[in-house]
Image (tube, helix red, strand yellow):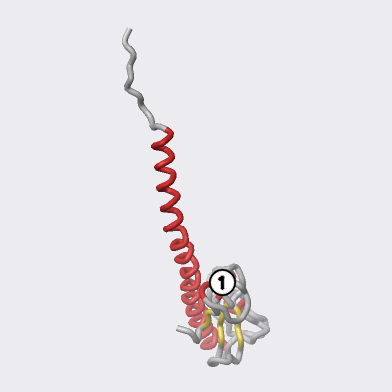
Amino acid sequence: MKKNNNRNGFTLLELLVVLAILGLLAAIVGPQVIRYLGSSKTQTAQVQVKNIAASLQLFRLDAGRYPTTAEGLNALVKAPASVPLWNGPYLPDSSAITDPWGKPYLLRVPGQHGEIDVYSFGSDGVAGGSGEAQDVGNWKS
């Protein structure tokens, strides 16, 4: 009887080399991916702020005024009792007035940077910051 010495499979050494290479790739690529995901949320917030500001302009055309700070951005989704000429909804649902970090966008009427300010404080929810924690508003481009 002849023994068949052809082995199918990998040796332990080969598996360890592959795992070491994968570990190095993860260490190099991981931080880049995380940084990209953080900046994409900020960019998403910038686009959403512009959409909300455009919806506020439509609200103003119909109602003759912007929503008050008390009415807030919900006035773009559901008609406030004090606006008889409401022709909305101006945004599809309340998720459109929530920033990528799960917090509601803020509205200031009159604004400090223009007629209205629509803004988010970023990932940390506190004024100021940089990177993903930076403030995003309709006055910033």
In what element is the residue under mark 1? loop
Left or right: residue 69 compared with residue 9:
right
Pinpoint residue 66: horizontal percent, then vertical percent.
58, 88
Please provide percent x and percent y for residue 95: 57, 68
Residue 107: % across, % down? 60, 83
Identified by mark 1, the residue type is Asp
118 over 101 or under it: above or below: below
Q: Which residue is at the far front?
A: 13
Q: Name which residue lies at 42% across and 38% down.
A: 15
> Image quarter for residue 105?
bottom right
Quadrant of the rendering where the N terminus is positioned: top left
Q: Give 115 or 135, whichever is nearer the viewer.
A: 135
| Relative to 1, 134 lies left or right | right
Task: Where is residue 85? Give x, y as percent.
Answer: 58, 85
Asked whether 59 or 99 is in front, the reply is 99
Q: Quadrant of residue 4?
A: top left
Residue position marked by numbered label 1 in the rendering: 99
How many numbered badges does the structure rendering display?
A: 1
Hey, which residue is sitting farthest top in the picture? 1
Taking 97 as reference, is 2 left or right?
Answer: left
What's the residue at 42%, 48% (across, down)? 22
- The quadrant the C terminus occupies is bottom left
Mark 1 residue crowding within 10 angstroms, few (<14) / some (14–19) / many (20+): many
Residue at image point 51% right, 80% down = 55
Query: In terms of depth relative to the viewer, which is nearer, 41 or 10?
Result: 10
Q: Residue shown at 40%/47% (left/top)? A: 21
Q: Nearer the viewer, residue 130 or 118?
A: 130
